[in-house]
Amino acid sequence: MSGRSQRGASLILCSLMLLMLGGSVLALRQITLARPEARLQDVLYIPSSKALKRMSLGYNGLLADIYWTRAVQYFGWNHKHKAMSYPLLYPLLEITTELDPHLIVAYRFGATFLAQEPPDGAGEPERAVELIDKGIKANPDDWHLYYDLGFLYAMNMGNYEAAEKAFDSGSKLPHTHPFLKILAADMAEHGGELETARLLWETTYNSTDDPGIRSNAMRHLQALDVDETVPKLEDLIRRYREKTGIEPTSFFELVQAGWLRRIPTDPLGMPYKLLPDGTVQVQDPEAWSFIRRGLAPKGTSESPQKP
Amino acid sequence: MSNRLGAIAFNTFREAVRDRVLYNLIIFALLMIGSSLLLGQITIAVQKQLLINLGLTAISIFGVLIAIFIGIGLVSKEIDKRTLYTVLTRPVQRWEFIVGKFFGLVGTLVVNAGLMTVGFFVALLYLMHGLVRSDLSILAAVYFILLQFLIVTSIALLLSSFSTPIESAVLTFAIFVVGSFSEDLRSFAEAAKGAAHYITMAISYLIPNFSALNYIASVAHGEAIPGNIVLLNTAYAILYAGSAVCAASLIFQNRNMK
């Protein structure tokens, strides 16, 4: 074969290779579009953690990390798309913690993912408690898990008695956080109050370096600010109306009348909205995941539409 | 040209049969007969599902192993035995040699998988006392397994064109494993930011996507496979395997045989 014809053949082969490779990428993109549900659907075709543990040939630590990453991806993807249910979340977390019972992060974050109301989480606080209980059984000396358990009982289930017990058990551990004792006492006295919730979120914020947890705690603290400020403002408007007989149409009127020092703003810096009926709402309800006050009543056009 | 390609492909097939490759069919037949006899007695409600999973997984694994272990020796064996020089002294282009070898091995795998599929359907018939319309989707899953073989064979051939048989075997197997997790790889790529996102995304497109070709679990659950998926997967496998065979031919074309 002459050098020239060999070069020609090489050139043709090279072009063909590139064309086909490009074509395969395009075909794969179409396949991905045609079956979007394939993302994590296959995960639970092996739903038994015991079977998986055996199949891992002893590399269950690595497999647990992979499953934990899958759980995070699954949660993240669904959360991003404002899913209202997370059916694979608990099985994924169960498999992860079965493969590595000492993967504390899976219990802690997993419980948060499970407990928060949709679309911020799966809205399954009972399963979150189940997961943390399992974590405590496997890691009885880790105070974080008792803290999380107490937190879940108090914040997501309103069971302050159980929360007190959890905080109290955690406070008796060696190397525990001193705040658990205070939290246990606080549950007994002031369970259900906003201040208790603030204390819990502040403890969460201060007891971790993880930016994800801190940011979540900060958002909850800001939401608590809104929940506290809105009723105060509504009360102020009611008193103004009673005293002057005038229905204020804006906060500016209250500022001019000396009832407020400045236009009130939410923790994101947006001014609150004063409605004609004297109720107060946040400007952008979509920016707030955890507030209970300051939203339009459900069913009205102003209430945030969640899928 | 087609005569030369056919001759090389046929000889590759004959050589594989002579190497007792089809012996795996005996193990497969025993596995199927044993399973179909046993499953009815030891499990409840999932006999069919289990048999489909077991049968199709066996077809896939046997085929992939054959594709790897024969694929890696297609070129090196010819060089070691010096039979390659005899072939190349004839009016055969180097790329024809590679393409012929590829088709020879793919043919072997198709015959092998075809016989296994017949055995599998006999076992299914015995277990379920009949076949239903939805069982047709099993054939589509088998077809996808054949497409997997196409890609694995092309990769084995490509790697063996420039590395030793052991390295090629390990690498091909590693690529098969990574490619089976490529949906995860894509999910990680989507979650990553900056350079990591682009690098992972590029890798996820470069590594063959075997998970897109794996419908075993779906058909075991009686799910149908959409027609557009069959077409797209076919196009994908042919294009991907084609580009790998072109790369193998290109390397072999420029390889110094002295």
Image (cartoon, coloured by chain):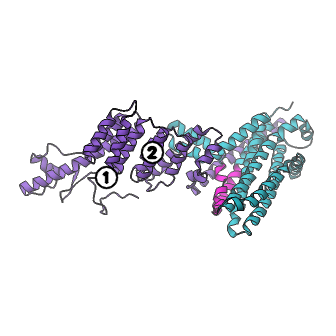
Chain colours: A purple, B cyan
Q: Residues within 10 Å of mark 2 (few under 14, many from 20)?
A: some
Which-is-in-front pick, marks 1 and 2? 2
Q: Which residue is mark 2?
A: A133
The numbered mark at residue A132 is none
Badge 2 amino acid: Asp
A13 or A240: which is nearer to us? Answer: A240
Work out which residue is located at the far left of the displayed protein and give it: A244
Distance (Cα) linking label 1 and label 2: 35 Å
Q: Is residue B63 magenta?
A: no
Rendering coords of residue A58 (x, y %): 63, 38
On screen, residue B22 versus residue A212, left or right, reads right
Residue A257 image position (x, y, % from top left): 9, 48
Q: Chain of mark 1?
A: A
Mark 1 Cα shell of 10 Å, populated few (<14), some (14-19), many (≥20): some
Q: Position of residue A2 (x, y in %)?
A: 85, 37
Name the one closer to the observer, B245 or A94: A94
| Dominant secondary structure of the residues highlighted in magenta in the image | helix
Identify the residue under disc 1.
A285
| Residue B121, picture quadrant | bottom right
Residue A225 appears in the figure: no
Q: Amino acid at mark 1?
A: Pro
Looking at the image, which residue is at 72% across and 68% down? B131
Q: Is residue B13 left or right of residue A229?
A: right
Q: Earlier in the sequence, mark 1 or mark 2?
A: 2
Q: Position of residue B109 (x, y in %)?
A: 80, 51
